[in-house]
Image (cartoon, rainbow, N blue to C red):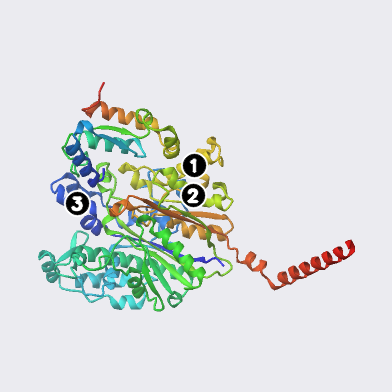
Amino acid sequence: MNSVIKGSGYCLSYTPGLMLHNGSTITTERVVNPDGEFLKEMGKHVRSYEDCVAYWPNQVYIGNADPEELRKVEFPYYDKKFENASRYGKFGEIMPEAEFLLLAQSCDCFEVFYLEKGFVEAHKKELAADPVITEAILNRVTAGSELSEIETLVSNGEAEGLYYENKLVGCVKRAHDIDVNLSAEVMLENLMNKASSVLAILHSLKNAGISPDDVEYVIDCSEEACGDVNQRGGGNFAKAAAEIAGLNNATGSDSRGFCAGPSHAMIEAAALVKAGAFRTVVVIGGGCVPKLGMNGKDHVKKGLPMLEDCLGAFAVIVSENDGKSAEINLDILGRHTVGTGAAPQNVIGSLVADPLERAGLTVNDVDKFSPEMQNADITKPAGAGDVPMANYKMIAALAVKKGWLQKSELASFSEEHGLVGYAPTQGHIPSGVPYVGFAKENIEAGKMNRVMIIGKGSLFLGRMTNLFDGVSFIIQKNTAENEQGAVSEDEVRKLIAKAMKDFAASILDKEAEA
Amino acid sequence: MDLENQKRVKDFAEKYGPENLVVVLGAAEGEAAGLAAETVTAGDPTFAGPLTGVQLGLTVYHVCEPELKEEFDPAVYEDQVSMMEMVLDVDDIVNEMNEIRKEYCKYLSA
């Protein structure tokens, strides 16, 4: 039987301090253009936590509104407020910066993460009030250090400073004196990624209504690498996050594929469960510090707030068929293979048209397509356009070429079968998976039959191959009942009886002929 | 334009001579195509990459422009580009590219 989506968690962590000090656009600018306008101006373009929470796309990401409701909001979104916005949503939360720094400190197992005493004291109660944060996590938060100790580590160049409201409140120290793979910058990025994953796992467990002990395997599909000089990407983020989240019965491993990573990982999880290797698998993707403020120069130039101020994270729980949850159909997989080529029509053909054709379906049989779900509020001012819309136009154009759609239906296709983008531009985070939670809900409520999740990745960034990549899969209504029906004992008995009757009749006929 | 790509374009221009180079773009929007075209002609407008302040003036076209389409085997074009031709705002891209070429290209024969 197909495996099912048991639950999901979608979280954002508001981290403007990390954005202003550790985002790659900003760190690059400090090297190439240290006296430029952007570095002088950017501080004025940071929005408040309240504004970040009241931002429509963020409320959709954590589940407080369906993407269809966002469609009704007039573009651009940054100057509109979500009424009665809440930190918590049905899929997760938007964690404030101070609490997130404490959570990240709790994820440190090698005493490299320092927070100032007073800062810990001031914010520990806030973290404790978060309903998913466990006693075990709170116990891992240390009492904190003297500010002078932190200042010395940062001024010596041994540590990366952590800033809250423009004040130094902590640091992340290098984990090795000369190994760049364990530098302060890398340790900071990896610990923040780990912490954001932990938060998403905790929300996914709550939403699925399962115990941490039920999880048997974790797959991490982020885009960071952890290891040392002899094994740069050795891993294992999955097991590291599982430890802090209290998944005591789980093992795990990391799977990588740039932005296509989450879709690969979802297929792997569904296959592991369907094969019976593990009963419950969690797929996680944590946040990416370097991508904070990635398009900040364009946002500042155009007078917008720097909208990339949150680490994104997700966790999806895939488990054995329970007879009711939406399931993953492994028979309809889209595959961008080595031989597919990089032309957009080949890419969309391999990921969308080919798998549907093999299953005797067309694009009209899929209620919603979830490709790259980047929020256009972020990408449009940076000249990258509306990414989901570009995908829907390509799917519709290919459907016209296939004869599945009239040319006059091109425009309406995007609205009927598409979604408006709402996910933060955190690489793998917007890639197909943000809609898994909504897809599960809408399918289980009988509003939809099939949703296609499409992951695509630009492998050239790693300079190992110029090939493009991608995979897609279908989430559909639970079919366990039909499958059980087809093999029920009663049914088998009837089939055998009918076969014997037919056989006897054929012998009688032959005798009669003779 | 990606910093690494800027470096490659600059290196090619030095190696083969800017007059012998044609840059072919595949950007999905007029604005993005224009920015990339400006980068390889007038220099990086974002002041971030190796082409900052470098006015290469290279010949540059978008793959959907008629001048370039003529150069292709029609069957290959149909197979590789026709779907995107249906999707993109080709007029907008052509206008943007024409403007940049008129202003900054140094090697266009009239």
Q: Do the residues labelled 2 and 1 touch (CB within 8 Å)?
A: yes
Q: How far across and how far down the image is residue A450, in percent? A: 55, 55
Q: How far across and how far down the image is residue A395, in percent? A: 48, 44
Checking the image for residue A320, the label placed there is none
The amino acid on which the numbered mark 2 sits, given as a three-letter code, is: Val
Q: In this view, does A64 lie to the left or right of B14?
A: right
Neighbourhood count class around disc 3 (C-alpha, 10 Å): few under 14, some 14–19, many 20 upward: few
Q: Report the residue marked by disc 3.
A: A28
Q: Is any part of residue A91 visible from this angle?
A: no
* Front residue of this view, candidates A48 and A396: A396
Identify the residue at the far front of this view. A514
Cα separation, mark 2 vs mark 3, equals: 37 Å
Using the image, name the chain to which the residue with label 2 belongs.
Answer: A
Q: Report the residue marked by disc 1.
A: A398
- Residue at (30, 68) in percent of width and height: A235
Q: Report the residue marked by disc 2.
A: A352
The amino acid on which the numbered mark 1 sits, given as a three-letter code, is: Leu
The amino acid on which the numbered mark 3 sits, given as a three-letter code, is: Thr
Figure check: A409 above or below A510: above
